[in-house]
Amino acid sequence: MAHVRKFLGQRLRALRKQRALSQERLGSLSGLSGKFIGEVERGEKSISIDSLYHVAVALEVPLRLLTDVRAGRRAVAPSEDAEKIFALVAGHRRPADVRRAHEVLRAMLGGT
């Protein structure tokens, strides 16, 4: 299950950074320690569903955004570069800007 912890940790780090929160601040907002947040982000520690719920509330995201590991398929953690692109594009942007970024990436990389 280490791959699931790694996936969750990378997703958590990207969302935290997207919101310009330190590990300490996210810990404080979710009733956890910043040290523990860091351990979860590095995939070193597991997190209870209750604590994960508090983290999701602190990040203002649905719980499923942190836990969406496709059933029946091995979880593959997104690359660090992919998470950086996601954080850059998904940050507080106008929908028109996000659509334009998608069009540019699609033109550069091909595909849908």
Image (cartoon, rainbow, N blue to C red):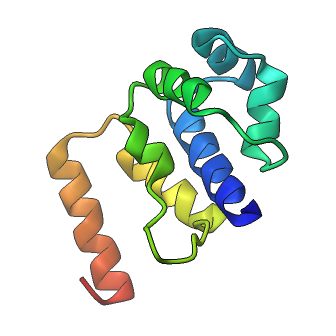
Residue 22 shown left or right of residue 82 in the figure: right
Image quadrant in which the C terminus is located:
bottom left
> Residue 73's x, y, as percent?
49, 77
Residue located at (56% from left, 33% from top) = 49
The percent coordinates of residue 38 (x first, y second) are 79, 34
Residue 77 location, quadrant: bottom right
Residue located farthest toward the left when viewing the structure as drawn: 96
* Pick the front one: 39 or 110: 39
Of 92 and 59, which appears nearest the observer? 59
Q: How many marks?
A: 0
Q: Position of residue 26 (x, y in %)?
A: 63, 20
Would residue 65 appear left or right of 22 to someone viewing this image?
A: left
82 or 78, which is in the foreground? 78
Please tell me which residue is depicted at 21% across the width and 61% down the height of the picture.
100
Report the residue at 58% width, 66% height from top: 78
Q: Is residue 29 above or below residue 89?
A: above
Horizontal side, residue 95 vs residue 52: left or right: left
Q: Kindly give the residue lying farthest to the bottom in the view shown.
A: 110
Residue 70 spot, x, y in % from top left: 43, 67
Work out whether 92 lies above or below 21.
Answer: below
Could you tell me which quadrant the N terminus lies in?
bottom right
- Indicate the quadrant where residue 83 lies: bottom right
The answer to whether residue 1 is above or below residue 42 is below
Q: Nearer the viewer, residue 5 or 107?
A: 5
